[in-house]
Image (cartoon, rainbow, N blue to C red):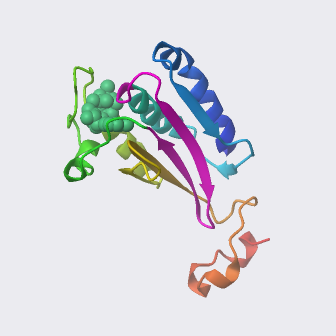
Amino acid sequence: ERMDIGAILRNVVEQFEHSLEDKQMTLELRANGTYYSMINPIIEEIFANFISNAIKYSPEGALITIDIVDTNYYWKVNVTDSGEGIPDDVKELIFDRFKRVNKKGVKGTGLGLAIVKRIAEIVESEVGVEDNPEGQGSRFWINLKKAYNNTDQTVPEDTLTQESLPPKSLRQ
Ligand code: ATP
Ligand code: MG
C-alpha cells in the first residue's frame, strides 16, 4: 500500500502522548512533509518500539527527536534520545530475545527489539543503533527501502548499473 511515512509517524507519536506527559518529555517530530512509499503498515510496530524504549530509558524531562533522512534508495528514520545510551559491546545483542542491560528497575521482557528485528526482515529493511551523534543517549534507526516501481521515488539512473535497473516497462 502506498502510504505517507510522516503520517504513520504522527499517528504512532499520538499514541504515546500520555506516557510523554507522565515523564514531562518532549518529542520533536521533524517530519512535516509527505514521504510517500509502498509501505507495509506493520512498520508502525517498529516505530512504537523505538519510541517506547526512548521514553522508558530516558530520564524525566528528556528530549526525543524523530527525523527522516531522504536518500536515493531509502528513507532513514532516526529515533534519537538523550537517555543512558547503550554500551558498544551490547549494541548488537539487544536485538536478541531477552537481552536487557542498564535496567535500573525499568520493567520489560526484552522482546521489543527482537520483534523489531523480525519485522524489519519481513519488510526487507535494515535496523540498527548508534550513539546519539549530537550528544548523550542513543539513536535507533530503520532504513525503509524505496521500491523500484514506486512512481514517487527518485533514483537517478546514472548511479545504477544497467543490471540493477528495473525493466523498461516499470520506468517512467
Ligand atoms: P520490552 O520491550 O519487551 O518491554 P525491553 O524494553 O527491556 O522489554 P527491548 O525493547 O528489546 O526490551 O530492549 C532491550 C534492551 O535494550 C533494554 O532492556 C535496554 O537495556 C536496552 N535499550 C533499548 N532501547 C534503549 C534506549 N533507547 N536507551 C537505552 N537502552 C535501551
Ligand atoms: Mg522495549
- Whether residue 111 appears in this view of the structure is no
Near-viewer residue (62 or 57) = 62
Please report the residue visible at 63 percent of the width from the left and 36 percent of the height from the top.
Answer: 8
- Displayed quadrant of residue 105: top left
The correct choice, above or below, for 43 with respect to 164 in the image is above
15 left or right, relative to 168: left
Quadrant of the snapshot with the N terminus: top right
Please identify the residue farthest to the right as the structure is shown: 172
Picture quarter with ligand 2: top left
The correct choice, above or below, for 122 with respect to 13 in the image is below
- Displayed quadrant of residue 58: top left
104 left or right, relative to 115: left
Number of callouts in the render?
0
**Percent x, y of residue 17:** 56, 19
- Whether residue 79 appears in this view of the structure is yes
128 left or right, relative to 142: left
Please report the residue visible at 53 percent of the width from the left and 14 percent of the height from the top.
Answer: 18
Near-viewer residue (26 or 79) = 26
User: Per the image, is 70 magenta?
Assistant: yes
Numbered range of the magenta stretch: 56-81
**Percent x, y of residue 129:** 37, 50
Quadrant of the snapshot with the C terminus: bottom right
Near-viewer residue (166 or 25) = 25
Please report the residue visible at 20 percent of the width from the left and 36 percent of the height from the top.
Answer: 101
**Percent x, y of residue 15:** 56, 21
Please report the residue visible at 61 percent of the width from the left and 49 percent of the height from the top.
Answer: 68
Near-viewer residue (58 or 73) = 58
**Percent x, y of residue 97:** 23, 38
